Amino acid sequence: MVRRTEVIRNDIIFGRSRKLSDEIDTKQLLFAGIMTAEKFLDSRASVVYNTWGKTVSGKIVFFAGNESGASTHSLPVVTLNGVDDSYPPQRKSLMMLKYMYDNFIDDYEWFMRCDDDVYVRTDKLEELLRGFDSSKELFIGQAGQGLPSERGQLGLGPNDNFCMGGPGIIMSRSVLKKLAPHLEYCLKNLVSSHEDVEVGRCVRKHVGVTCTWAFEMQWLFYHNQSKMNAFHWDLDTKAVQNAITLHPIKNPAYMYRIHTHFLAQKILALQQSSTMKSNTLRNLKKLTQATLSRTEVTKLTSKKDLHHKVPLNVTLHWELFSPKKLYSISSTPTLPIQYSIKRSVNIVLRKALADINLEARKVVFRELLLSRVNLGYIRLAPTKGLQYIFDFRMMMLQHIGFNRRKLPINVQYQAHVQQSFGNLIYTSRRIDLAKLPFVNIILPLAGRLEAFKRFLANFETAVLITNEKVKLLIMYFPNVSSDKEHKIILESYRKMYSNFDVIWQTVKGQFSRGKALQLGVAQFSADSLLFFCDVDLAFDVEFLNRCRVNTVKRKRVYYPMVFSQFNQTISLTQNHRESLEHMKREGAFKHENLQSDHGFWRRYGFGIVCVYGEDVAKVGGFDLTIKGWGLEDVKLYEQFLANGRYDIVRTPDPGLVHIYHMSSCSPDLEPLRLQSCKNSALSQLANAGSLVNYMTKKGYL
């Protein structure tokens, strides 16, 4: 590998070597020694090797005690003689450095010592090390002087320090050459129980250098103070973005998470570079095809153009947002910004600021600081991706006067940003229609005889006549109302249809939907597909198929939005009502015939769900302490969200219609739930236009 070409200048030409062998450097960049132990070889060490260890510009080797039997392991592991895996690992650390010197001192420019719970961004590390001369005595890392309670007990002088071992230590070949003859002496003269302190003391005493005091090293060699919870949350932070090494990562799963995060960033950077190069090539093609006038040249698109292939004869609406509000034409005029949108905007804004500063440093030779985000715009361009416009104020520190006083200067910016779509990624699974599972419907019920008759009539059309693979479990509360007539009607259907698979189960006490569903779940096996239903719900065959396909055990739960009918007396004309009743009598009711004056999608209803019994148990089931109207379904939904392992399919389903009925709210409910109950009942009356027409006809307006 040829070392970077140096510029020949008259003032240094005679200082260069005249030997070709000195001009050609065959050394690799980095030897990374990872201290580990036998118990971590199959977990932390393996993850390190399979993530950032694959991209080291040089060699990576794991070091363990000689009792581990690591020589048979598939990883590149060295067992050190006379070294065990006990803590603190002073002997392991110093003997590892000796091994590096004995075997590789002439093969590498830099030598790194780190633990098996650190992630290294090898591209940034290479960029850093390429800027230094390994023939000089350089001891690189995050400098430390020990805890305040330990000051004066670590054998360090008042101005001495050490490189903290957690985020990693790097020493030049020159340092290791001078240090190696003294490692045995340092090992015999330990002062503290901290191996990184002892390495630092040894380097200071025998090489004469200390760890880099540069303030930036605490960012580059980053140690997260939250320890066991480090890097469990948002990775799109300034600290993570600036870091070269990240420590500590105790759970191997989070090492993979961080690795995936940085790979995704590289992919986005490549996509951005590809887009800009494509725009440049497009302009070059135009320039080579014909001689363009000055006016035509000015019309060439910038290499950063966001609007290429976006139709100019179609208006794609923008949504405006401020730091706290979102203004949209597709929903309520103003909404609080949801966490997912806020996080997305912050990620994009942070990257935009980084690009702005990259250009600013080339022009004004200083960094701009974000002062305030005034507002922004966001829209989805279907062929391109998400597009943003940011209107923000930035501050630049200008040095003035003889004393170089810093004067803040505000600069207004408007940034256009596009977050492009990535390459198509898909997974597929074959659906065998002959092997689709039974849908086990659980129906809580108390009284409601007429609604029950309507439910069975719909059940007959959707299930019995079509011979669908469906089982019905009715959980009835006889203490609320007698079940005599219900059983008579049920028996009549049993006699008509031999394929009617139904179970009648009684539940003691007052009506509780959560209790009924929880007891119903217990009636089925863990691998049974369950459909939590209501007596006022009408469904069709297509919905049953969507229930089967959209629900995957241990992976996916189907939460359809139900179309909720308005009060037909208010919302429909007399002709509409008669036509609808005729369709119901003829069994020709079409669920897809949904209109805004007939009803609305229940965006905030979570009671109807398709889920496997095993998954209900995994998230803890229903909260049986909730009494009366509402909340038990919302709690279950929140449990699935909090679990973090389920893909929740939330979509309007035209095969589900909630038939309107008068609702009453118990005055015994707590104030908040009572108000929610009343609001829900009122929302089902009619839309605004129908209410105005109704009140006008009645003479109220």
Image (cartoon, rainbow, N blue to C red):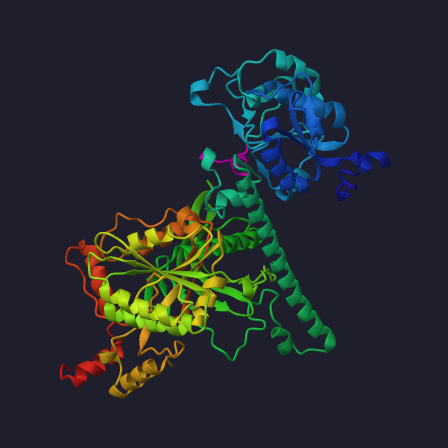
Provide residue 484's location: percent of width, then percent of height. 23, 64
Q: Is residue 562 left or right of residue 285?
A: left
- Residue 615 seen by the camera: yes
Provide residue 616's location: percent of width, then percent of height. 40, 51
Q: Is residue 488 above or below residue 220?
A: below
Q: Is residue 342 above or below residue 4?
A: below
Q: Is residue 69 left or right of residue 145?
A: right
Q: Residue at x 35, y 62 (%)?
A: 533
- Residue 105 seen by the camera: no
Q: Is residue 394 magenta?
A: no
Screen quadrant of the N terminus? top right
Q: Is residue 216 left or right of residue 618?
A: right
Provide residue 421's location: percent of width, then percent of height. 56, 63
Screen quadrant of the C terminus? bottom left
Q: Is residue 216 magenta?
A: yes
Q: Is residue 496 above or below residue 238?
A: below
Q: Residue at x 57, y 35 (%)?
A: 118
Magenta residue span:
214-226
Res 128 → quadrant: top right
In this rendered view, identify the residue nearer to me: 603 or 113.
603
Q: Is residue 226 above or below residue 379?
A: above
Res 210 → quadrant: top right
Q: Is residue 53 left or right of residue 515?
A: right
In this rendered view, identify the residue nearer to me: 263 or 176.
263
